[in-house]
Structures are given as C-alpha cells and as structure tokens.
Image (spheres, rainbow, N blue to C red):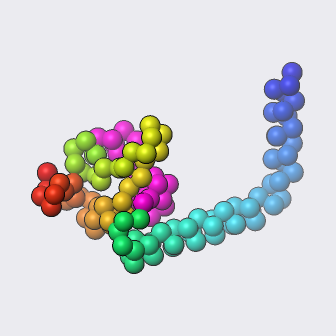
Amino acid sequence: MNQISASNTSLHKNEQNTSTGFHTCQRDLTKELHHATHLLAVLANGTGNELLTKADAKSVGAHPFSESTRRRKIKEGDYPSPIMLSGQMSLWRARDIVEWLKDPTTYRVRCNGVSK
C-alpha cells in the first residue's frame, strides 16, 4: 500500500511541476553546457594529467558508444584504458582522451611511446 501511495504522490508532484518543467530543463542544459565548456578548456589548456570521469568523457563527445563497445575497444587498444579506482569507479587521463579525440578511427593505445 505504501508503494502505491508513494507512486501516486510522485506522479502528482510531476503533474504539478510540468508548468516549471521548461525552466528546470533550461537550467539543466545551461549547467551541462557550462560543465562541457569547462572540460573543453581543461582539455585544451590543461597539463594532460587531469582525470576525467565517464560522464566527463561523454559530455565532450569522447564516449559515443555502449558499455560493451567501450570495453571491447579498450581490450583491442582502440580506446584509452581507464585508471580503475575501484570496481565501480574509472577515470581517464585528459591527455589520453585528447589523443583519442584527435582521430578516433586511427587511435591506438601507446605503451612506452610505442603503438600496440
């Protein structure tokens, strides 16, 4: 019974918020644009040692594929390998993402300066 009431309550709240939905959406897009602009500045002007999350990579267009495709590309050396902080958290070096963005079709992971 509580599940149904909670569901009905959230539905009612959503109906009430539809009048302000446009403004909420606009704020969200503005926030995302600001974040992406900041990330692009970091990629262009940073040291390359900055660390990016998967969400960061997606916001700058460096993660345009599914999880399974990303894993396959990493395994084949066609996408930068992440730094695994835990089983749930991966980060990428900004310089690796910049290199991939330059030409994703010919990108190959480098080990000690030599392409795989």
Does residue 101 appear in this view? no
State how many labels appear.
0
Which sits in the foreground, 13 or 71?
Answer: 71
Q: Is residue 53 left or right of residue 107?
A: right
Quarter in which the N terminus is drawn: top right
- Residue 9 higher or lower than 36, as above or below: above
- Residue 14 higher or lower than 92, as above or below: above
Residue 67: x, y in percent? 40, 41
Look at 58% across and 71% down and name the residue there.
34
Q: Give the residue at the far top of this rendering.
A: 1
Q: Quadrant of residue 23?
A: bottom right
Q: Is residue 69 left or right of residue 105?
A: right
Which sits in the foreground, 45 or 66?
Answer: 45
Look at 32% across and 65% down and name the residue there.
95
Magenta range is: 51-72
Look at 22% across and 58% down and name the residue there.
107
- Residue 60 higher or lower than 87, as above or below: below
Q: Quadrant of residue 51?
A: bottom left
- Residue 58 higher or lower than 47, as above or below: above
Q: Is residue 25 left or right of residue 62?
A: right
Residue 115 located within the stretch drawn in magenta: no
Residue 70: x, y in percent? 35, 45
Does residue 1 appear in this view? yes
Look at 87% across and 51% down and name the residue there.
16
